[in-house]
Structure formats: C-alpha cells, structure tokens
Image (cartoon, rainbow, N blue to C red):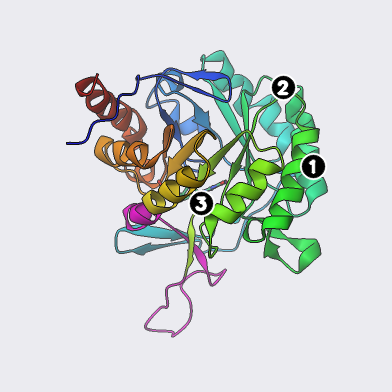
Amino acid sequence: MVSKRLPIDVDICGVHWKNRVTTASGTFAVQKRSRFYDPSQLGCITTKGVSPEPWPGNAQPRVAETYGGMLNAIGLENPGVDSYLEGDLPQLKRRGAVVMANIVGHAAEEYCAVAEKLAGSAVDLLELNISCPNVKEGGIAFGTDAKTAAALTARVKRAAGEKPVIVKLSPNVTDITEIADAVVDAGADGLSLINTLIGMRIDLKTGEPILANKTGGLSGPAIHPVAVRMVYEVRRKLPRVPIIGMGGVMTGADAYELLLAGADAIAVGTAALADPLAPVRVAAELEAYLSKNE
Ligand SMILES: Cc1cc2nc3c(=O)[nH]c(=O)nc-3n(C[C@H](O)[C@H](O)[C@H](O)COP(=O)(O)O)c2cc1C
C-alpha cells in the first residue's frame, strides 16, 4: 500500500483540529447529534447553512433514495443567524468543539450580512456555500461561474474580519480547478469539496419527478469517485491551499483515499444520516490508517 506520512491532527487555516474529520454541513443537527457523541471528539463540527433571516426550506417530498446514495432538496431550511448565535454555536463551544459555520445567501449582501455577524462570534472558521442560486442573476448558482464566485469570495472575506473563509465548491461545473483558482486568487483561505451533484428521479406511477423541487443534490457513496477526482485535480493545480475533501465517505478507507488525493481533512455527511456515530467511527478508522504509516 502506498503510504502517506501524516500526523493524526492538522492545522486548517491556523485552527488546530485534533483529528482530520469534520461533519459535512447539513448532516449534523446539534441538539440531536450531541446526544450520540461528544462533538469535541471530532477535529471540527461544521454546522448547516445559516442565512441572515430564517429560511423555510422546500415543499415535501424533499428526499429520495437512489442506488448508493440519496437526493435531497431540503432548500437550506434554517432558523437564521441570530438563532444560530444564541443556540447552536454557544452550545457547541461550551462542549469544547472547534466550529465551522456554513454560510448561505441568495445575494452577495445576504452572505455578507451573515459573515459580519459571525465575525464577532466565537466561531472558528467560515465555510462559504457558493452552490446557492444567485437571485439577482436569474438563479444561476454563484459557484458555477468563476468571476461571480471570485467576486462573492472577495466581498465575504472583507465582511468576515479575522475569520478564515473556506469556500465550498460545487461539482456541477465543467472545470472545478478554474473556480478553485479564481476563489483562492480572490482571498479564500481554504477550499471544501465537493457539494452535491444535481440529479432527478421520476415516479414511475405518476411520470412526475419524485421531489417537489423536481431536482435535488445527489450525495453518498455514489459520488465518492467524483470527489476523489476533483480533490486530486484541485490539489495538482493548487499545491498549498488547505483542502477539506468530502463526498460519500463511509469508512476510514474512503477518508484515507481523499487524503491520498490531496485533502488535508475530510467530512462525513450522508453516512451520518444512516448511522449518527459514523463521523467518530471514521475518525477512529482513519487514525488506524495514519498510525500504520507513521
Ligand atoms: C440533507 C443534506 C443537507 C445538506 N445541507 C448542506 C448545507 O446546508 N450547506 C452545504 O454547504 N452543504 C450541504 N449539504 C452537502 C454536504 O455537506 C456534502 O457536501 C455532500 O452531501 C457530500 O458529502 P456526503 O456524500 O458525505 O453527504 C447537505 C447534504 C445533505 C445530504
């Protein structure tokens, strides 16, 4: 086996993680999950997308099963940044967790409003979800155009004060390295990849899409090879930028594969929806891989 000599812990944009595992945004509900394990056992807890005002999310049905994964069109339902600052964030910090807040918006001003509020908070890192539709530009996702993605990154960086900004890339693009390069040039301190791939399923009885939103984001083991390929490509283009790899990590072996592709840390998402303990299990399994190679 090819070995990669890496310590168990890691520094991501100047923030120390005790191990290389975080939760993928949207898959760790603070109240529910904290009952299963102590959140400080992971290198970092990445929380679900937070917007300036509460977002209600999409109509039901919002999830559909697929081979090797699932489709979701939750629509980034969340109670807004003020509620986050009063609830989830202090709760996680009290328990000693490193916290990365995922930021969403429908316009640059919305992202900046959240970043400004979080700049003065106890949050450790910001993760900018650029897969949201840009309402002012006909609903095309910020993350699918290099110029738009770079402009958003630069504005959020200014709003974020001292907080490191990690840009979470969309895989729904022809060349992910072009977007990665543009956002790093615009000031991104690190990158997360990948977000979900756009998919659709059709109900054979009605002939209509299963999801009320028609399309949804594909996640889970089915997308793991896409994540490995994209992390590998971005790492080759940008040898030094911190990268958090994600997409279908079910085991320590999957996590280690993303590290071999060039990631510094990894996130566990869909696996935790079936087994809430998946992130801590993956951390232990990854530790065994890394210890073998010391
Ligand atoms: C139910 C669900 C909710 C999600 N919510 C968010 C979110 O709020 N912000 C975000 O950037 N990504 C969100 N994602 C994407 C995940 O963080 C992750 O990038 C993706 O699912 C790939 O990892 P996985 O295959 O391990 O789930 C969500 C994914 C799922 C399945």
Residues at circles 3 and 1 in contact by the CB criterion of under 8 Å: no
Q: Earlier in the sequence, mark 3 or mark 1?
A: 1
Could one spot residue 50 in this view of the protein? Answer: no
Pinpoint residue 198: horizontal percent, then vertical percent.
50, 65
What residue is drawn where x is 35% and y is 19%? Answer: 7
Which residue is denoted by mark 1 in the rendering? 155
Pick the front one: 100 or 260: 260
Quadrant location of the N terminus?
top left
Which residue is denoted by mark 3 in the rendering? 195
Would you identify the image quadrant in which residue 70 lies? bottom left
Residue type pointed to by label 3: Asn
Could one spot residue 124 in this view of the protein? Answer: yes
Pick the front one: 151 or 205: 151
Which residue is denoted by mark 2 in the rendering? 121
Residue type pointed to by label 2: Ser
What residue is drawn where x is 72% and y is 22%? Answer: 121
